[in-house]
């Protein structure tokens, strides 16, 4: 996971991100939300931003699952 996908706490506060969404992909969620507001939430307008954010979420999920399975193997 690239460290550039994490926004600073000041950026997250300025973008008014809810606490539950302040994760490893927060730097990609901020421009996605801006695009959504600017384009009146039309689903076909922000496809690139949405794809980048969802890929980051998927990669983070896969990283966490592999870490969990590694920890389980070490405990066994």
Image: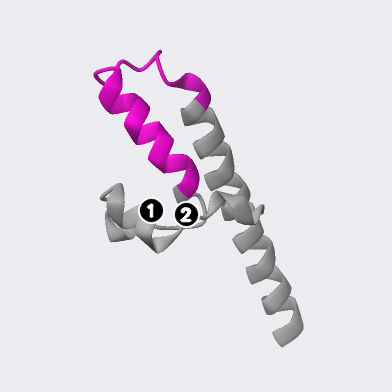
Where is the C terminus found, in terms of image quarters? bottom right
**Do residues under tags 1 and 2 come within 8 Å of each other at their CB atoms?**
yes
31 in magenta: yes
Q: Residues within 10 Å of mark 2 (few under 14, many from 20)?
A: some
Q: Position of residue 33 (x, y in %)?
A: 34, 34
Main secondary structure of the magenta stretch: helix
Q: Position of residue 54 (x, y in %)?
A: 51, 37
Q: Position of residue 9 (x, y in %)?
A: 39, 62
- Compared with 43, 2 (above or below) is below
Query: Which mark, residue 7?
Result: 2
- Compared with 63, 33 (above or below) is above
| Frontmost residue, 61 versus 40 | 40
Quarter of the view holding residue 18: bottom left
In this picture, residue 43 sits left or right of residue 72: left
Q: Which residue is mark 1?
A: 11
Q: Residues within 10 Å of mark 1 (few under 14, many from 20)?
A: some
Q: How many marks?
A: 2
The answer to whether any part of residue 21 appears in the image is no
Q: Which residues are magenta?
A: 27-48
Q: Which residue occupies 59% across, 53% down?
A: 60
Q: Secondary structure at mark 1?
A: helix
Q: Which residue occupies 68% across, 77% down?
A: 72
- Give the color scheme: rainbow, by chain, secondary structure or one colour: one colour
């Amino acid at each position: 996971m690239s460290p550039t996908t994490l926004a600073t706490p000041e950026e997250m506060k300025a973008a008014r991100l809810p606490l539950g969404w302040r994760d490893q992909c927060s730097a990609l969620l901020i421009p996605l939300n801006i695009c959504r507001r600017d384009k009146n939430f039309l689903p076909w307008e922000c496809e690139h931003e949405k794809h980048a954010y969802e890929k980051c979420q998927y990669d983070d999920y896969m990283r966490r699952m592999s870490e969990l399975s590694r920890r389980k193997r070490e405990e066994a």
